[in-house]
């Protein structure tokens, strides 16, 4: 599975209108393996790791984006390496600056992330 992450002014009504990042299958595997059982350390990442395909859109309000960003920084500091950790952190920072929320949905077609034209 993979995740479609979008910026949102009116979550979840505008999900998919302002795409931020497409998190690939490997990113999902990393957070599933490392954050699913560590709810206290990775509160938001824990919730994302539990997302299922066709589950309701997961909303991270603007006032919780700092917590998500700290979770991503903690994940990177633990020695886990994946380029989308830093990229997702940048998305969080942009959303915070813009006063936006993030909406996240599961995607069963992780091969589509390879095609930039599919998820811009």
Image (cartoon, rainbow, N blue to C red):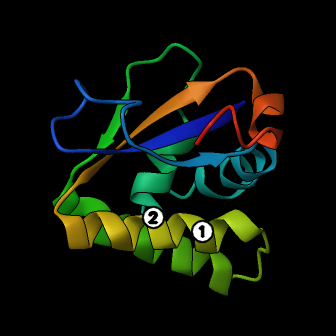
31 left or right, relative to 44: right
Out of 52 and 36, give the one closest to the viewer: 52
Helix, strand or loop at label 2? It is helix
Q: Position of residue 9 (x, y in %)?
A: 17, 44
Helix, strand or loop at label 1? It is helix
Q: Height in image: 2 above or below 57?
A: below
Do residues under tags 1 and 2 come within 8 Å of each other at their CB atoms? yes
* Residue 103 seen: yes
Residue in the picture at 42% in, 77% down:
70
Residue that mark 2 sits on = 91
Out of 114 and 75, give the one closest to the viewer: 114
Looking at the rendered image, the quarter that the N terminus falls into is top right
Q: Quadrant of residue 59?
A: top left
83 left or right, relative to 74: right
Q: Height in image: 59 above or below 83?
A: above
Q: Position of residue 24 (x, y in %)?
A: 73, 44
Q: Position of residue 62 (x, y in %)?
A: 20, 58
86 left or right, relative to 80: left
| The furthest residue to the top | 54
Q: Position of residue 68 (x, y in %)?
A: 40, 64
Residue in the picture at 59% in, 18% down:
53
Residue that mark 1 sits on = 87
């Amino acid at each position: 599975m993979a995740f479609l992450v979008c910026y949102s002014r009116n979550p979840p009504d505008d999900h998919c209108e302002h795409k931020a990042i497409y998190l690939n299958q490997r990113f999902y595997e990393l957070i599933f393996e490392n954050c699913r059982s560590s709810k206290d350390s990775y509160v938001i990442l824990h919730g994302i790791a539990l997302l299922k395909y066709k589950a309701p859109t997961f909303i991270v309000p603007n006032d919780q984006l700092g917590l998500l960003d700290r979770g991503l920084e903690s994940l990177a500091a633990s020695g886990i390496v994946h380029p989308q950790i830093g990229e997702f952190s940048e998305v969080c920072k942009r959303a915070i600056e813009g006063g936006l929320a993030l909406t996240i949905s599961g995607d069963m077609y992780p091969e589509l992330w390879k095609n930039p034209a599919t998820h811009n």
